[in-house]
Amino acid sequence: MTSIPRRADKLFKDIWLPEETLRVRKDVRQFADDVVRPVAQKINTTPESRDSFPHALFKAMGSAGIYRIPFAQDVGGLGLEFPTLGTVTVLEELGYYSPSLASALFDGQAILVGQTLNRAGDFLRKTYLPRLVRGEFLGSFATSEPEASTDLSPANMQTVATKVDGGWEISGKKRWITNSVAADYIAVLCRSGERQTFLFADMLSPGISVGDPDRKMGNYVQLTADVNFDKVFVRDDHVIGTEGAGLRAALGALMLGRMGIGAIGVAMAQAAFDFSSHYITQRKVFGKPIAGFQHWQFRFADHALGIENARNLVHKAAMLYDKTGNAETEAAMAKVAGSELAVDVARDAIQACGAYGFVQTLSGSGEHFPLESIYRDAKIGEIYEGANEVQRWVVARNIFGRDVTG
């Protein structure tokens, strides 16, 4: 993306955020400007392949200490007072240039895998989490299956963990597994009897095989693939949490991930808003800037309201979780608000910019344009880490009660 004014610097005021969060924003924005922006167009528009995983960017994030932000000092983290607030701030800054990079390399790595390990027993937490914080290994988080994604109930899950001497044996298939083509370790939710157990497996274990990356509409940096398990052995000390309590552990990480998807949605909306509002201020039709027409003035005013509200909701959910340890309703609201906003703003941004919104690369001049990839990337936010229909059900459940909603 070319250098354009960041409208949020004028419209959005960080007056409620603690100093530590402002420092996180400043540091990660500098990293994103220096490291992510120069390669954003390339990685956002290069279709998935095994060779397209951004190893250099992953290493750079580890070297810059970005994985330290969500975690306590005893595992090498920064020990922030508000680590979740810092986490969603990281996702917004990275997602401004590459939402799929933010989703794969920070949401998937630091939230889904990292926070799962953070809530594991002492052995797993102290053995693996410091290494994750230093960026020494890449992880995958495997809950979804060909026939189980929104519904992760034991009856619907076909990946089975069977108790054997000294550990467990996993057989089954997981689908849509982020980072799996390059991962070193994988957290796997399995059916174990009538309940579920979460296991942490080495990707080099005999019996694990990973398919080619899925070819998707967008989110190209977030490589997903099928992972097959054929009698894969996992030691007893690699159970995450306790036997039979795997679903609770998985849902705890996914709840935090929903805040993250909301933050990435805000990032996409802001990026599309910035590019298009700058463009229509410069581009003239019928003798005046496109922004001189009241229709677009009102549309962009509405989108400024939406970005402000969604960002504040993400911040509130994160701070509430940091203070109380629970923000289920607010996380659901943040996910819906941010993800739907991204789709709406990207669509209007393309319309306002016309052909310059629709084009990826203008061959005559060699110029690259960001809106088409933002639009492609935005849609998945309404689907993954809990479809928005499910998030609305979570909110409704807190309005009417479980005895009514089920």
Image (cartoon, rainbow, N blue to C red):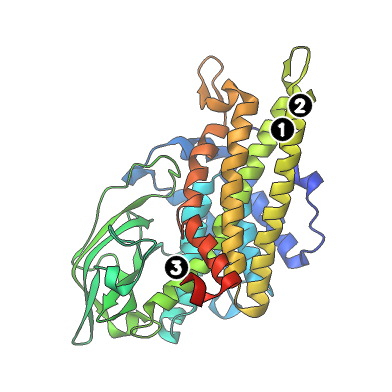
Give the quarter of the figure containing the C terminus.
Answer: bottom left
Would you place residue 375 above or below residue 100 in this image?
above
What residue is shown at x 44% (from left), y 41% (from top)?
Answer: 218
Question: Which residue is denoted by mark 1 in the rendering?
Answer: 277
Q: Quadrant of residue 149?
A: bottom left
Residues at circles 2 and 1 in contact by the CB criterion of under 8 Å: yes
3D distance between C-alphas at marks 3 and 2: 44 Å
Q: Nearer the viewer, mark 3 or mark 2?
A: 2
Would you place residue 57 above or below residue 278 in this image?
below
Q: Helix, strand or loop at disc 3? A: helix
Q: Kindly identify the amino acid type of the residue bearing the numbered disc 1.
A: Ser
Question: Which residue is denoted by mark 3 in the rendering?
Answer: 113
Q: Nearer the viewer, mark 2 or mark 1?
A: 2
Q: Kindly identify the amino acid type of the residue bearing the numbered disc 2.
A: Ala
Q: Nearer the viewer, mark 1 or mark 3?
A: 1
3D distance between C-alphas at marks 2 and 1: 8 Å
The answer to whether one can see residue 73 in this image is yes
Residue 237 placed where, x, y %? 33, 84
Q: Residues within 10 Å of mark 1 (few under 14, many from 20)?
A: many
Q: Quadrant of residue 21?
A: bottom right
Q: Helix, strand or loop at disc 2? A: helix
Residue 351 placed where, x, y %? 61, 28
Question: Which residue is denoted by mark 2 in the rendering?
Answer: 291
Residue 393 placed where, x, y %? 51, 64
What residue is shown at x 61% (from left), y 54% (from top)?
Answer: 337
